[in-house]
Image (spheres, rainbow, N blue to C red):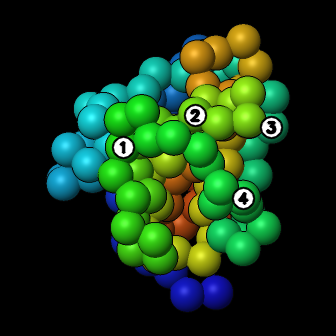
Amino acid sequence: MAEHKSLVSIDIGKTDIVVRPLGWYKLWSFKSELRIPRAAIAEAHVARRATLTMMLGLRMPGTSLPGVITAGTYVGGGSKQFWVVGRAEYLLVLDLREQPYQRVVVQLENAGAVLADLKG
């Protein structure tokens, strides 16, 4: 499994996690941080890009260059999602309940290790 650089940093606390887009991705995603209560995470997993729907709906706001960058808020099909991904094949997916976003998808250098930290 080829690794790609992290496009976000994730701080895992006892009660919440904070996702911060890095560098230009902060500008392209129109968000400097996203704070998520740990209790709101319904499911966390690492998924292959090909298994995730890229028909995200409207960018509100965000940046998209197919196959290169998907960053920001996307609304469609009754769902609001936050993405910060580049070209990585494997992505960290957080499905949320009772939050403004129903799903957060991010690119991390070692998504598996972050997932283990989240579940640990």
Q: Specify which label sits upstream in the sequence, 3 or 1.
A: 3
Q: Mark 2 points at which residue?
A: 75
Element assignment for label 4: loop
Residue type of the residue flagged with mark 4: Thr
Q: Report the front residue among 54 and 46.
A: 54
Residue identified by numbered label 4: 53
CA gap, disc 3 and disc 1: 24 Å
Provide residue 33's location: percent of width, then percent of height: 34, 29
Which secondary structure, mark 1?
strand
Q: Which mark is residue 62?
A: 1
Q: Which residue is label 3 attached to? A: 43
Q: Which residue is drawn at 74% across and 43% down?
A: 44
Point out the tag, 4 or 2, that comes first from the N-terminus.
Answer: 4
Q: How many marks?
A: 4
Residue 3 placed where, x, y %? 50, 80
Q: Distance between the residues labelled 2 and 3?
A: 20 Å
